[in-house]
Image (cartoon, rainbow, N blue to C red):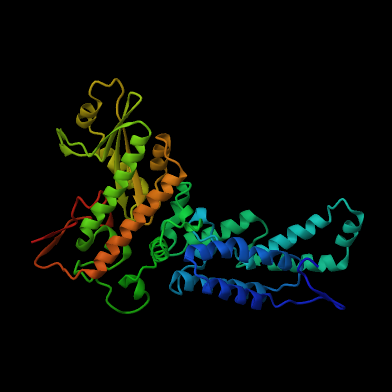
Amino acid sequence: YLGVRYTASGLEKARIDTEVKDLLTRVSKGPLKPQQRLVILKFYLLPRLYHRLVLGPISAKLLLKIDRLVRSSVRRWLMLPHDVPVGFFHAEVKHGGLGIPSLRTSIPGLRIQRLERLGDSDSLLCRKAAAGAYVGLCLDQAMRLSAYRGKEIRTKKDYQATWRDSLHNSADGNALKGCKNAKGSTRWLGEGTTFLRGREFINLVKIWINALPTLTRLRRGREASIRCRADCLADESLGHILQKCHRTHQERIRRHDVIVRYLAKRLQDKGMRVMVEPLYRTDVGDRKPDIVLHNEGQCWILDVQVVGTRAPLEVCYTKKVQKYSEPSILALVQGKSPNKPIVRSVTVSYRGVWYKKSVDTLRDLGMNGNDFKLLTVRCLQGGLRAFWVHQRKTTVRSGRIQLQPNGDENEFVNGGERRSAVVG
């Protein structure tokens, strides 16, 4: 009945796990991009199982087996290492995950809701059935199954919070805590977008979840050297490669400039007067903000920065705003305008996470969710180019290297305009 098989002795235990395995094999063999496979999995393959799993016989073992089959296929599609956080697969896209349903934590809650609603039915027969022993046994089983790793997961809110915390409390997912700040910035993970090639989508996902093959990632937990292959006297982490290594200096500038050009064009399209990187000679030295715009009698100073993940985004944002809030530069930008210029920073991490105040500023200027999606993808693409340059180059530092005090991966926050190490 409606996909649930019955025999003379009652419900038949269907081999749903075998069916799922066959379906995943068919999806894997199809000539599809990996992002298209994810869409099929999330919106077509798994939902077709819900009815049978909610009304038919289930066990924790069956649900876990299906979840593992699904994760194994996704790892193969996206070429992810085996130690990618499980939370990354099941956390919502808005929280930085792939948004793949976890049957082990969703089906028990759905069964509870279905059986409890049966007791509130308008039909007298349904209410009598709900009061029977069989429905009571099913409800007790669903209650037991709703317990997962010490938590009770019975509602959609519980489900989302569980996998969000699982992702954000992991070593690789901790830097994604703020990804919800920019609504729309994570859509590329779940839309099945075709403007990215399959291979590029895979590599952007790896940057997003810190799964690119850097030495710190490849040798995690092993006693082996993880010193940068460019002789930087630093560990070869993704943050070091994308934010600090001398091999990727030009690619950092290119990544920064791509974001600036996109913003300048979008603001011009909205009828604003935009100047890109004007030079101002001030009492504290030359200043060259990325964008100075005039809109309805108000001047804005915007400066773009792609920062690391060690320092809080708020600290990086505040430092940049303070840099361009000097009275001398404000006077030059204001000119004859009656209104004092507004100084803001467009701050995003190399993992594609936006600072909330930067998002609010861009939204005030007319940017929407699609803009944040494209800007995030451009940022990640710039990081990917830098990574491949680092892997292919053979240059190393030579001579005396003098490290600057308090240097960290955030030294290259404005297109790599400051060096954290000086070659003697």
Q: Is residue 115 visible?
A: yes
Residue at 54% over, 57% down: 92
Image point (91%, 54%), residue name: 124
Residue occupying image coordinates x 44% and y 61%: 173
Figure check: 108 above or below 184 = below
Q: Is residue 408 left or right of residue 160?
A: left
Residue 65 horizontal/vertical position (percent)? 62, 76
Say which of 197 and 144 sits in front. Answer: 197
Left or right side of 298 for 277: left
Residue in front for this viewpoint, 63 or 320:
63
Q: Residue lying furthest front in this view?
A: 31
Q: Residue at x 26, y 69 (%)?
A: 391
Locate the C terminus and report the quarter of the image it occupies: bottom left
Asked whether 394 or 45 is in front, the reply is 45
392, 103: nearer the viewer: 392
- Residue 314: x and y in percent read 36, 46
Q: Position of residue 410 (x, y in %)?
A: 28, 54
Q: Position of residue 50 (x, y in %)?
A: 69, 64
Q: Is residue 228 visible?
A: no
Q: Quadrant of the N terminus?
A: bottom right
Name the quadrant containing residue 136.
Answer: bottom right
